[in-house]
Amino acid sequence: MNLHRRMVLEFGVFTQHLRRSMHPRIQREQKTIDLMIELYCHDQHKNQNELCDDCQALKDYAHRRLEKCPYQEKKTTCANCPTHCYQKSMREKIRVVMRYAGPRMLKNHPGLTFLHLLDGLRKPVPLTKKRK
């Protein structure tokens, strides 16, 4: 087995472990953002089976932000969050994706869309202590 394939497999096992250890709320948020980015990339960049490099980078970035979110399962949606952890350029990219994919998600994934809307109604919880 070549080195690249082995690294991909090992990274896959590592990310599966991370996902199992994450709260279901964060996993759902990641699933929602994945579907939005996939919908956007498929329609705008005409990619059929996989994301383009830019969209894959945005997806990876969004996952890292969610994994490090200090609010975790108590979080509101990122748009309503008092802590803006996205870099300015990435924030603009995700806004473009959400502006495009948001209305289409209602048709394609109504359950996740409804839960995302409910999450947006949550009040941001004040942080009790700084997370490392």
Image (cartoon, grey):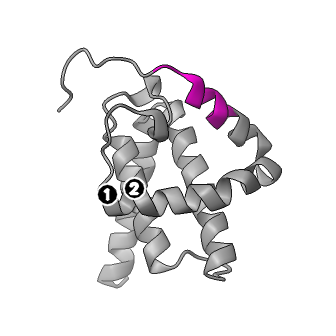
**Residue at 58% in and 55% down:** 98
- Quadrant for the N terminus, please: bottom left
On screen, 102 above or below 19?
below
State which quadrant residue 69 falls in: top left
**Residue at 59% in and 76% down:** 50
For this rendering, which residue is in front, 132 or 44?
44
On screen, 81 above or below 87?
above
Task: Inspect the magenta stretch and tell me whether residue 79 lies in it.
Answer: no
Q: CA distance from mark 1 to mark 2?
A: 5 Å
Pointers 1 and 2 in contact (CB under 8 A)? yes
Q: How many numbered marks have been drawn onto this rendered protein structure?
A: 2
Q: Under tag 1, what secondary structure?
A: helix
For this rendering, which residue is in front, 59 or 104?
104
Q: Please identify the residue farthest to the right as the structure is shown.
A: 107
For this rendering, which residue is in front, 22 or 114?
114
Task: Measuring from the top left, give residue 107's x and y in whole percent.
Answer: 82, 51
Q: Which mark is residue 16?
A: none
Question: Are there few (<14), some (14-19), or many (20+) residues within 10 Å of tag 2?
Answer: some
Q: Amino acid at mark 2?
A: Arg
Residue corresponding to mark 2: 91
Q: Amino acid at mark 1?
A: Lys
**Residue at 48% in and 19% down:** 123
Left or right of 109: which side holds 59? left
Q: Under tag 2, what secondary structure?
A: helix
Q: Please identify the residue farthest to the top as the structure is shown.
A: 128
Residue corresponding to mark 1: 88
For this rendering, which residue is in front, 44 or 13?
44
Which region is colored magenta? 115-123
